[in-house]
Image: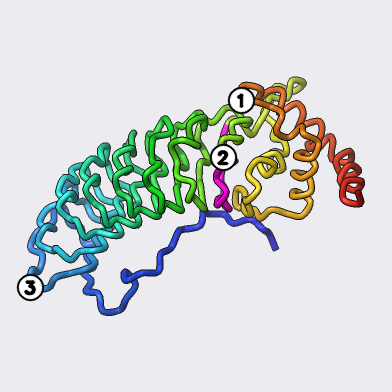
């Protein structure tokens, strides 16, 4: 049986959103083009509009006790009305045409937010949503690390498939409360920058696959080839149990311990990516597998 988990884990929260007495309105897949004629004699707590053709939020201000709203897979552009829904705790705006989330700034009760697969280039405005525990901003146009340091309850951050090319400011701008971080399929160039994650001592799941820093060009054949980067990441991020959907093995832990004990694992500074790759390819890569196996045996019995 494979150890791989093919999809990032979805962060779940056990709170009153799951209680049975909440009133729910389900209008998914109804070919709706706008929101109107909603029954106003019931104060709904949960409203679902997924898989319609809605481009603007309207008339939801009449539901002051609304705590969960899902309007994914629509044509949403205008979400200004959201700044009036102060009771919202769980919000799904994924798969729309949204390019600005300024209206979310006032949502102080927001716990879970999904804004994946939109046209969003900045999420800095969310730094004021202090209750936020789960944020999915994957599939957008985010190019840089932005300040989320005030989100001290944030445990799940998904930035898969954006355009981030450096991690050099994460230790200042991201909260140390993170348990799961997804930064796969970005433009990160320098693997030595993984060192900036070393202060995230609660981090147990990391996705970094499909970044340029995880492959190198074979000079003989002129093609990209991968190398064993896992133990190097573990040597910096000691709390990780799951890397790129595969649980850490005992052998990988031993490799990381060996790299750390030799003083070599943390000797490469940002900007020395090429030197690091050459070292890892020689010591931990496929060509050096017999070498590292022999080293690990000696290290283990020592």
Mark on residue 270? 1
Please indicate whether residue 146 sits to the left or right of residue 253 in the image.
left
Q: Gap in Å between the C-alphas at discs 3 and 2?
A: 51 Å
Considering the numbered disc 1 on the image, is that residue within a helix, a strand or a loop?
A: loop
Q: Is residue 208 magenta?
A: yes
Please indicate whether residue 147 sits to the left or right of residue 6 in the image.
left
Residue 61, percent across and down?
Answer: 11, 57
* Residue named by callout 3: 41
Quarter of the figure with residue 5 = bottom right
Quick one: label 1 or label 3, which is nearer the N terminus? 3
Q: Nearer the viewer, residue 52 or 134?
A: 134
Quarter of the figure with residue 90 = bottom left
x 9%, y 61%: residue: 62
* Residue named by callout 2: 197
- Image: magenta residue range: 198-211
- Magenta stretch: helix, strand or loop mostly: loop
Please indicate whether residue 101 sits to the left or right of residue 8 in the image.
left
> How many numbered markers are drawn?
3
Q: Gap in Å between the C-alphas at discs 1 and 3?
A: 60 Å
Residue 33, percent across and down?
Answer: 16, 52
């Amino acid at each position: 049986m494979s150890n791989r988990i093919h999809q990032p884990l979805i962060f779940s929260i056990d709170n009153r959103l799951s209680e049975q007495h909440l009133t729910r309105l389900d209008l998914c897949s109804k070919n709706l083009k706008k929101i109107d004629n909603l029954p106003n004699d019931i104060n709904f707590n949960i409203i679902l509009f997924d898989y319609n053709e809605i481009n603007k939020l309207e008339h939801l201000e009449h539901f002051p006790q609304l705590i969960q709203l899902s309007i994914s897979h629509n044509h949403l552009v205008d979400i200004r009305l959201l700044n009036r829904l102060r009771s919202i705790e769980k919000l799904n705006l994924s798969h729309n045409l949204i390019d600005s989330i300024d209206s979310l700034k006032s949502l102080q009760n927001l716990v879970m937010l999904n804004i994946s697969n939109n046209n969003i280039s900045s999420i800095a405005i969310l730094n004021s949503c202090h209750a936020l525990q789960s944020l999915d901003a994957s599939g957008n146009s985010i190019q840089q690390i932005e300040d989320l340091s005030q989100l001290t309850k944030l445990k799940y951050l998904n930035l898969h498939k954006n355009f981030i090319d450096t991690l050099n400011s994460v230790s200042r701008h991201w909260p140390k409360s993170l348990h799961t971080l997804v930064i796969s399929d970005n433009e990160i160039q320098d693997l030595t920058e993984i060192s900036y994650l070393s202060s995230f001592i609660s981090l147990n799941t990391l996705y970094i696959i499909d970044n340029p820093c995880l492959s190198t060009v074979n000079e003989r054949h002129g093609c990209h080839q991968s190398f064993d980067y896992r133990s190097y990441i573990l040597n910096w991020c000691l709390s990780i149990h799951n890397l790129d959907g595969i649980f850490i093995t005992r052998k990988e832990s031993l490799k990381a311990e060996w790299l750390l004990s030799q003083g070599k694992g943390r000797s490469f500074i940002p900007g020395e990516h090429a030197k690091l790759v050459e070292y890892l390819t020689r010591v931990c890569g496929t060509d050096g597998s017999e070498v590292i196996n022999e080293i690990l045996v000696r290290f283990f019995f020592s």
